[in-house]
Amino acid sequence: MHPVRLLLCLLTVVAVPHARATTGDDGILIDRAWSGHPVPFALLVERGHQFIAYYDAERRIVLTGRSLPDGAWTRIRPEGRPVPKRDHPSNAVGWDSHNSLQLALDRDGCLHLSGNMHADPLVYYRTRTPFDVTTLERLDRMTGELETKATDPTFFKDADGNLLFRYRDGGSGNGSDYYNLYNPASRTWRRFLDTPLHGGEGERNAYATAPLLGPDGRFHLLWVWRETPDAATNHSLSYARSRDLIRWESSAGRPVALPITLAKSDVVDAAKPGGGLINMVRDLGFDPQGRPLAAYHRYDAHGNSQAYVARPNAAGGWDVHQMSDWNFRWDFSGGGSIAADVTLGRPQAQGDGTVIINYSTHAAGSGRFQLNGETLAVIAKLPPAPSVIPTALRQVRSTFPGLSVQWHSLRADGRTWALRWETQGKNRDKRQATTPPPSELRLYEFPDAPPAAPPGSAP
């Protein structure tokens, strides 16, 4: 779509029909979505309401919502503003697969929407009225400081339910992470921290997970450092923890002054640039004793891709365990969005004292590592867990060549909600040679299976 036409798009509100989605039917048709390249959409289910943010057939941001279980959907296309260095306005996506959309509800039930940024001016909307998407307003400002090169927007909540927002100021290989805190009484944002949480010192940036509240009542954070936009320059997997998101410390309890720099980092794995660390494949979980576990990818001594898990030890360091014995190499480098040849799930403690970590690879298939919760030794390599999504829905329906199925799902209130659409693959954030027709964006509901009856119980 021509940029001038996109600039003429004004905010519109449309009521759309709804239907009940159950396992085995074809869900709810939400809209026709952009299929030129994959960009993460947003799905939020909270306090009896459901919201979806996505890019429509004309690449525009769209927000739709309803009350559960079967209220009428209301859809809104918010207005944008010109972005001088782009050939599209702020409410329309280009070809960048980094430009995800993020949603959150504050204490009052007002909806916050951000996204479509990769070192761009802040894109930010908020509703005036709780749960009412028709009152969405474009604000494009939080504190007004350091908001012209924003990336990686993330909404999350602290232990008391306060809404926070994290973003990177700067580019890949040269940026710092800032945290804002929302005040619902004044409907304003302020800096939560006086400094960046991670400081790149003008030489690098941190790619961090969202702060994760653990069973010990602390927030845990895992990140890699990157020296340049080249993905091969990721290095030094690092960790920190905090009870209040203000005072941070190492895994051994050593205070770490902010901003956290490379020199101050509690390094989990000191892999060098070119060593196979990548910001796409690192996640935090916990063992059966509530201790943090880091799962990640890097190369072994022979240059092959391997999956690793690490845990803090009593000496103040980290014990690293190799889980896989793969004989392939995911050889990545350069800038732009990269398709993942390896993925690792969050470590999950099990009731039997073991830990499960899901994995998927192009070369060695998919499955689950089952670890001894005490030693972290691999007990078994299990097949993938059964999916709640029927096999038929995981197959591409379009006849246009080169498309794949995209999913965004979450569990809430005893069921899984899943968005499905189809797109071309990532292309290093460059224009694709072809543009497929728009894809159907459908929402599916998969209730949890009822618990099995105990042996000998009456039918």
Image (tube, rainbow, N blue to C red):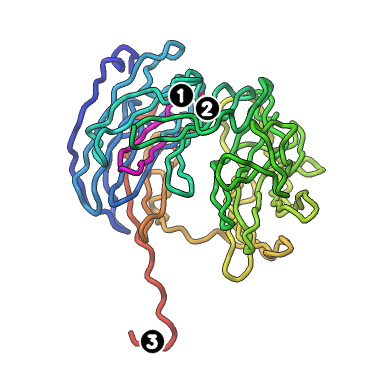
* Earlier sequence position, callout 2 versus callout 3: 2
| Viewer-side residue, 441 vs 345 | 345
Residue type, mark 2 in image? Asn
Q: Name the secondary structure under disc 1.
A: loop
Pick the front one: 243 or 167? 243
Magenta region includes residue 163: no
Q: Give left or right: position of 261 versus 284.
A: right
For disc 1, the marked residue is 95
Q: Residue at x 63, y 68 (%)?
A: 353
Left or right of residue 338: residue 262: right
Amino acid found under the numbered disc labelled 1:
Trp
Above or below — where is 361 with respect to 112? below
Mark-to-mark CA distance, 2 and 1: 8 Å
Assign a secondary structure to mark 2. Answer: loop
What residue is disc 3 on?
457
Residue at (60, 33) in percent of width and height: 197
Q: Which residues are magenta?
A: 102-118
Closer-to-camera residue (283/127): 127
Residue 405 appears in the figure: yes
Image quadrant holding the C terminus, namely bottom left
Q: Which mark is residue 376?
A: none
Marks 3 and 1 sit apart, C-alpha to C-alpha, by 57 Å
Q: Could you tell which of marks 3 and 1 lies nearer the N-terminus?
A: 1
Q: Residue 82 appears at what percent x and percent y? A: 37, 14
In the structure shown, which secondary structural element does the residue marked by tag 3 occupy? Answer: loop
Q: Position of residue 259 (x, y in %)?
A: 64, 31
Q: Which mark is residue 427?
A: 2
Label 2–label 1 contact, CB within 8 A: yes
The residues bearing labels 2 and 3 have C-alpha atoms spaced at a distance of 56 Å
Q: Is residue 402 visible?
A: no
